[in-house]
């Protein structure tokens, strides 16, 4: 630890000899949104000194002693020439080319809604707001229906909650952050993805493999980061109304106000409810819950480009209530009785965060950042005669310093972070209390030769009262054999504390007996989880028949050294115990993106998963995990007219292969689910620049799982189990809505 700190301080003093830089960001206007431009070229007139922008539109370029004229160019946009005199940072907007005003032919390309990073060493997929509008993504959990990197499944037959998987592993093995602050974790693992409305999201970054050491040690399979819309750049007013045939209604109202050139604020209001009773399979249980949610977010932004300061402050309150179970269940009359099975899940959450960044005016390559967050999450719930309550209080703080070593090809990030989590759980009639405290330091070095090779290597040291003291190393490499071929490789480790009840709340929708094989560990008597992730990725960009596309092949291996095994194999019982043997998740994906024209684009993918764990009954494929999945998406949109009127249409297909089923009174030992396919489609009409209407169909073929709830005829008996779900519970769903902004 002492050596690491000495090294960091040494590097800090080295920056004083570094050359001066110009830093900045490039954007374009798409409607009322500021869209970052990735891969734009910048160079000093008459020199060979140049660079390109990253996926956020940011760049860093050494100042030239010979000229002050900066050339900025990007395919499909007008080339600009800027005079740079005393500026050390700039923000610039490029205008799309207008072929009517030019003598030469201009080739333009519409910005893709999903962009695969070209410049980053990490394997990052960027999803912008245009992609989120292609489906009925009312919240974050529903934002991945058109993205082949993420698998979306229903978690059980009662709550209607969708869970996500990546690289064959469930969301607890992903680090899910909001603007790089850990967000969906601990008590919020089961339902936390439903607490971020889709209209609040500006963009999503999906990182495959072990993420950066900066954000913590918990990332094992990858990281999902969401960026919330910024008051400074968002529209002054936005409204969205959504309604569906399954009784779900939703209203979003967002307003932003700029007080002056530095201060701006935004207020986000979200409400949804479902009051309609639905039982299409006639099993006397609700197919989707009766629910309502109120969600309020207030954001403040401070920006001073001249002095180099930027800051954000956020405060949010959320109340979410669900009623699930038997049709006609009345909580006031039927709770704690065995006349009718029912459940209520009530969640209250308040969280706030503060972020401050400073770029040194005389050293634009050097910056300092601080962020902190607090949350209080309280869930009161019962399932039939079972109880589950959790109170989770959390605090997180991070300090980060960025600079260079000698020149801009060599950069580093170093910092410290602390985390505090206090859990108070009631499981049936048993209390579980726990406090987690951790202190960590990290150092990340990156090298980029600005041509064909880049590297990011990081290490962090953490001191945790329950996980112990440990190091977390991670390395990412990127190499270009030629400008259209990108090779990536990564390796890294990750650790996490298994919150066995919060992460597996589907067990409460069963009458299984809970068994914990304690091994002397400090968390539920179990050891913490540890895994190594290895990844390879090859991306080939091509042009074909006047169109452009790319073919990407990913292969990732996750090997667990320690794992808390969740064992559903024995009827009437769910067991938690430490891994004694092998556990792996091997993921292969091949994806093709092709746009033959401005109006039309195709996206296809095939995924194969080899996910096996050593249970007491043997080395078996993980249950409810399809080994083979196929994905297809076609998108069509017309050119915008003078008033921005436009048609947009999407069709998405998911094919899900067989899934192994555990032995129950419904399913015999060794049985598998049938394969099936799902079709979704949406049509959007932009009437004018600030108003559009949309309508869509989900599960067009009306495919549903037969008998999703086991033992439904006796919900208080030993056979009752609503967790063995491999397909949709609710059939075809029709929805419609409108979006309006000022």
Image (cartoon, rainbow, N blue to C red):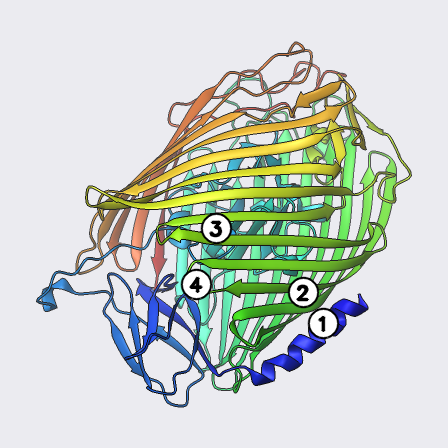
Farthest residue in the front direction?
A: 481
Residue 269 x, y percent position in the rendering: 51, 58
**Which quadrant is home to the C terminus?**
bottom left
Q: Earlier in the sequence, mark 4 or mark 2?
A: 4
Q: Residue at label 2?
A: 443
User: Is 3 situated left or right of 222 in this image?
Assistant: right
User: Is 679 situated left or right of 162 in this image?
Assistant: left
Q: Residue at label 1?
A: 7
Q: CA distance from mark 3 to mark 1?
A: 43 Å
Q: Residue at label 4?
A: 54
Farthest residue in the top direction?
A: 668
For the residue labelled by badge 1, is the local secondary structure a helix, a strand or a loop? helix
For the residue labelled by badge 3, is the local secondary structure a helix, a strand or a loop? helix
Residue 174 x, y percent position in the rendering: 62, 45
User: Is 285 situated left or right of 91 in this image?
Assistant: right
Q: Residue at label 3?
A: 198
Camera-side residue: 212 or 475? 475
Residue at the image point whose x is 61% and y is 61% from the top: 316
Quarter of the image for residue 297 reads bottom right
Q: Are marks 1 and 2 in contact (CB under 8 Å)?
A: yes
């Amino acid at each position: 630890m002492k050596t690491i700190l000495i090294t960091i301080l040494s590097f800090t003093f080295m920056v004083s000899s570094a050359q001066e830089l110009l830093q900045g960001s490039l954007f374009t206007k798409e409607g009322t949104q500021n869209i970052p431009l990735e891969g734009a070229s910048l160079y000093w007139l008459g020199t060979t000194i140049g660079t390109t922008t990253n996926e956020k539109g940011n760049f860093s370029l050494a100042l030239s002693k010979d000229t002050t004229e900066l050339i900025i160019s990007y395919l499909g946009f007008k080339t600009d020439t800027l005079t740079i005199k005393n500026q050390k940072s700039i923000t610039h907007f490029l205008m799309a080319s207008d072929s009517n005003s030019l003598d030469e032919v201009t080739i333009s390309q519409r910005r893709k809604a999903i962009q695969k990073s070209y410049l980053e060493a990490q394997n990052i997929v960027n999803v912008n707001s245009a992609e989120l509008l292609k489906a009925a993504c009312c919240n974050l959990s529903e934002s991945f229906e058109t993205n082949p990197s993420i698998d979306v499944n229903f978690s059980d037959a009662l709550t209607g909650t969708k869970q996500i998987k990546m690289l064959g592993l469930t969301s607890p093995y992903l680090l899910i952050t909001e603007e790089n602050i850990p967000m969906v974790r601990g008590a919020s693992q089961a339902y936390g993805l439903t607490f971020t409305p889709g209209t609040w999201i500006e963009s999503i970054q999906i990182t495959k493999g072990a993420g950066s050491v900066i954000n913590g040690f918990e990332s094992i399979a990858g990281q999902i980061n969401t960026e919330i819309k910024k008051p400074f750049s968002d529209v002054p007013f936005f409204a969205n109304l959504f309604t569906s045939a399954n009784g779900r209604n939703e209203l979003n109202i967002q307003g932003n106000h700029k007080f002056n050139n530095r201060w701006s604020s935004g207020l986000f209001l979200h409400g949804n409810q479902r009051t309609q009773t639905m039982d299409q399979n006639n099993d006397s249980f609700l197919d989707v819950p009766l629910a309502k949610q109120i969600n309020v977010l207030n954001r403040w932004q401070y920006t001073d480009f001249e002095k180099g300061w930027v800051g954000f402050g956020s405060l949010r309150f959320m109340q979410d209530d669900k009623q699930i179970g038997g049709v006609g269940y009345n909580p006031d009359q039927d709770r704690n009785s065995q006349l009718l099975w029912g459940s209520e899940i009530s969640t209250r959450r308040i969280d706030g965060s503060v972020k401050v960044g400073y770029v040194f005016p005389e050293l634009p390559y050097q910056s300092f950042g601080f962020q902190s967050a607090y949350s209080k999450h309280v869930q009161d719930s019962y399932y039939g005669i079972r109880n589950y309550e959790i109170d989770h209080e959390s605090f997180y703080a991070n300090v980060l310093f960025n600079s260079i070593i000698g020149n801009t090809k060599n950069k580093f990030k170093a910092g410290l972070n602390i985390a505090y989590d206090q859990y108070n759980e009631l499981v049936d009639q048993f209390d579980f209390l726990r406090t987690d405290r951790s202190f960590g330091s990290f150092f990340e070095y990156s090298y980029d030769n600005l041509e064909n090779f880049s590297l990011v290597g990081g290490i962090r040291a953490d001191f945790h009262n329950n996980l112990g003291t440990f190091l977390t190393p991670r390395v990412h490499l990127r190499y270009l054999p030629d400008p259209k071929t990108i090779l990536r490789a990564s390796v890294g480790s990750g650790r996490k504390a298994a919150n066995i009840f919060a992460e597996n709340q589907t067990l409460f929708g069963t009458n299984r007996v809970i068994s914990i094989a304690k091994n002397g560990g400090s968390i539920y008597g179990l050891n913490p989880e540890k895994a190594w992730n290895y990844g390879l990725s090859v991306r080939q960009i091509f042009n074909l028949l006047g169109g452009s596309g790319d073919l990407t092949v990913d292969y990732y291996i996750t090997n667990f050294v320690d794992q808390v095994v969740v064992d559903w194999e024995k009827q009437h019982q769910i067991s938690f115990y430490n891994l004694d043997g092998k556990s792996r998740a091997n993921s292969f994906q091949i994806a093709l993106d092709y746009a033959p024209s401005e109006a039309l684009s195709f996206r296809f993918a095939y995924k194969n998963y080899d996910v096996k764990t050593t249970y007491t009954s043997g080395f078996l494929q993980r249950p409810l995990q399809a080994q083979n999945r196929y994905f297809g998406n076609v998108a069509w949109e017309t050119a915008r007219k003078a008033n921005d009127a436009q048609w947009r249409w999407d069709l998405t297909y998911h094919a899900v292969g067989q899934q192994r089923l555990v032995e129950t009174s419904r399913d015999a030992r060794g049985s598998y689910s049938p394969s099936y396919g799902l079709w979704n489609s949406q049509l959007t009409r932009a009437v004018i620049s600030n108003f559009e209407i949309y309508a869509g169909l989900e599960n067009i073929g009306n495919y549903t799982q037969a008998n999703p709830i086991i033992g439904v005829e006796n919900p208080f008996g030993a056979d009752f189990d609503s967790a063995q779900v491999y397909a949709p519970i609710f059939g075809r769903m029709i929805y419609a809505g409108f979006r309006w902004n000022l």
